[in-house]
Image: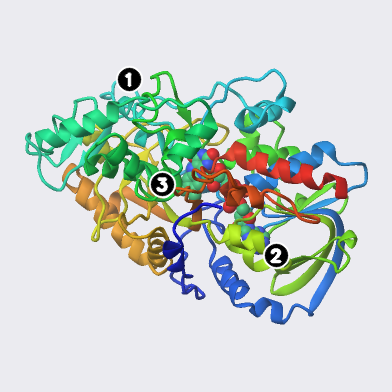
Amino acid sequence: MSGIPAAALASKSAVPLTTPENDWYGYGGVGDYQSSHGNTPELVSTAHQIRNGSLEKNASDVQSTEEYDLVIVGCGMAGLGAALEFMAKHKTGQRCLILDNHPIFGGEAKENEFNVTGTTLLAPQGANGFFVPEPVSDPNTARGDARYYAQLGIPRELPYARLPETNPPIYFCNDNFGYLVRGLQDQISIGHYYNQKSSDNSHWAVDMWRRELRNTPLPEQSRKSLLDWYRSGQTQHFEDENQARKFLDSMSYKSFLENVLNMPPECSAAADLFLASAAGLGSDAMSAYAAYKLPMPGLSDVPPESLKRHSFPGGNSGYARYFLKTLIPDSIQGERKFEDIITGRINFAAFDRPDQPIRMRMNATAFSVQHHSEQREGVEVLYRKDGRNHALKAKAVIMATGGWINRHIVKDMPRSYHNAYSEFQHAPFLVANVALNNWRFMEKLGISGAIWQGGENEFGFTCNLRRPMHVGRHTPALDPNHPAVLTFYTPFYYPGLPIPAQTLKGRMELFNTSYAQYEQKIIAQMLKLFGSAGFNPRNDVAGIVLNRWGHAYSVPYPGFYGGNSDEMSGRDIIRQSYGRIAFAHSELDGLQHWGPAADEGRRAYTQLAGAL
Ligand SMILES: Cc1cc2nc3c(=O)[nH]c(=O)nc-3n(C[C@H](O)[C@H](O)[C@H](O)COP(=O)(O)OP(=O)(O)OC[C@H]3O[C@@H](n4cnc5c(N)ncnc54)[C@H](O)[C@@H]3O)c2cc1C
């Protein structure tokens, strides 16, 4: 199996996780998601206990035992995908239980809610944007986004707020990601902030790609190189995916640009922010094959102007809610229609009722999963809830959880799976949502989003205001005098360091910074960017929610997809079920995305269906 060099993996070590201090988690907003924003402090300390084996020491102290046909561990998009397939295919009388260690379902597809002077504002905690997939005639033969979009009946026309016509035009991105995408960025009012002043004596270069970088302080030669990179289309042609994979997965995107296309390092540096926001680390750590699939300059043409990204008010929590409403109809108040599904209140009492084929149990952390000594007798799952241990007997178990946790809790996992999992690399991520009373300071600059260089004394790299989708009780005006959420998508990447050192350094920073310290850094950054345009934190900021994701993204490094070898890649080993246990998580796809995540769950169900 190919992978990153052994020497680079050797430096992989764990973050010294401890129980977070009281000032770590911070404000959670209002509504159903307020106690579950990013990794919870309980989750962080339980992860520590799982890793040092202390939960298992008391495993014999079991308070209850229940039996199910299928247990799914993890209620993110992969777990929900597995459950949707169980729902469609199960025989009468079969029962399924889903466990999740958060207070609410969705995994990385959750939302924050604010109430600012009577206005409801929703914002994503993690996964947030999408393209509406092409329609399909038969969802049952389709895969990924297109399959579920059709199967769940999600609308294709999506309603957005408009800026008052009397306002000077500012162009918005519908989500928190498209403004970083080549081609799409040209259609959005984005300001690049430079520490040194440009020719027109400003730190800002607004719409810099459309203006061919003429308004930046960059030297002439750099502008030319960056424009060549930004505009470069498909330079490589492959007979099939396998040929593309073998060539491109043997090098990083940085190496592709510099060694294959002879571009200077400033081009790969310019790609870092987009790549780290999409998949965890920058161009030095990213397989050129992942860059090809994304698609990046030099590997694909500029996307057409007609391509539009979208985002439900709470981001991809909208998808999680569609799945849930199908699995347990009473779990979201209201009818099975778009506005109720997206903004209806959650009915937690409906999650875990004995009379339904699918039950869902939150705040329940699985810490031991293994077959009974006779495999045909099924699998035993031990989990912890409210400080007590409980047992489940299941005919089969789907681990819809990431490898960093599966390695510690699946006790009889074969060595080949351990070896495969040891090659996965996970990067952290922070999503900070800042509720504003107004955004006049951005209107003054003529921008809906900002990008800056980041660094030692800075917070983050980007922030933007989405054009709000109007659904149900989420109808904020798109008006600079009205409340809105400014979202900071913040990767942690340190070009030049080995991959494990980058992810470790990022996790250390993410976990060892208190809420108050982050709050201070965010305000200081906003003052630097927007102070001269009138930003005043006392008047303008209504609240800040931090969503910390310790293992946000599986990094598709060079070799992740198998490199130039014909041997099975690590992810293909994990995709095989063994006994009555199968694994499903978006990390197996390399570029994590909601539809393929649900497909992983569906595949895992199909592998185990015969055992139920
Ligand atoms: C910042 C960010 C932005 C993203 N943007 C997008 C986007 O725009 N579009 C997109 O499609 N995707 C996006 N993604 C990717 C997103 O992660 C996937 O699309 C998908 O939501 C992941 O689903 P999953 O089920 O594989 O994993 P997860 O969401 O990680 O779900 C796994 C669940 O299992 C739980 N769990 C783990 N261990 C245990 C245990 N021992 N016991 C019980 N429960 C456990 C976890 O806490 C979690 O709730 C983004 C991700 C991040 C972090």
Assign a secondary structure to mark 3.
Answer: loop
Q: In terms of image quadrants, where is residue 71?
A: bottom right
Q: Residue at x 34, y 30 (%)?
A: 298
Q: Is residue 504 above or below residue 402?
A: below
Within 10 Å of disc 3 (Cα), the crowding (few <14, some 14-19, many 20+) is many
Mark 2 lies on residue: 410
> Residue at the location (93% across, 42% down)?
92
* In-image side of 431 versus 133 (left or right): left
Which of the two discs, 1 and 2, labels the residue nearer the N terminus? 1
Q: Which residue is mark 1?
A: 165
Name the residue: 13% across, 29% down.
Answer: 214
- Residue 266 is left or right of residue 467, and the answer is left
Q: Is residue 103 visible?
A: no
Which residue is at the front of the view, 545 or 43? 43
The span from disc 3 to disc 1 (Cα, nearest Å) is: 43 Å
Q: Amino acid at mark 3?
A: Met
- Give the residue drawn at x 36%, y 30%: 172
Colour style of the rendered protein structure: rainbow
Dot 3 or dot 1: first in sequence order is 1
Q: Looking at this rendering, what residue extends furthest in the right direction?
A: 93
Q: Secondary structure at mark 2?
A: loop
Residue type at mark 1?
Glu
- Where residue 296 sits in the image (x, y, percent)? 38, 33
Q: Secondary structure at mark 1?
A: loop
Distance of label 1 from label 2 (alpha carbons): 58 Å
The three-letter code of the residue at mark 2 reads: Val
Q: Mark 2: give few (<14), some (14-19) or many (20+) Cα within 10 Å.
A: many
| Residue behind mark 3 | 286
Rendered image quadrant of residue 294: top left
Q: Residue 295: percent from the left, percent from the top?
A: 42, 32
Residue 120 location, x and y as percent?
A: 49, 42
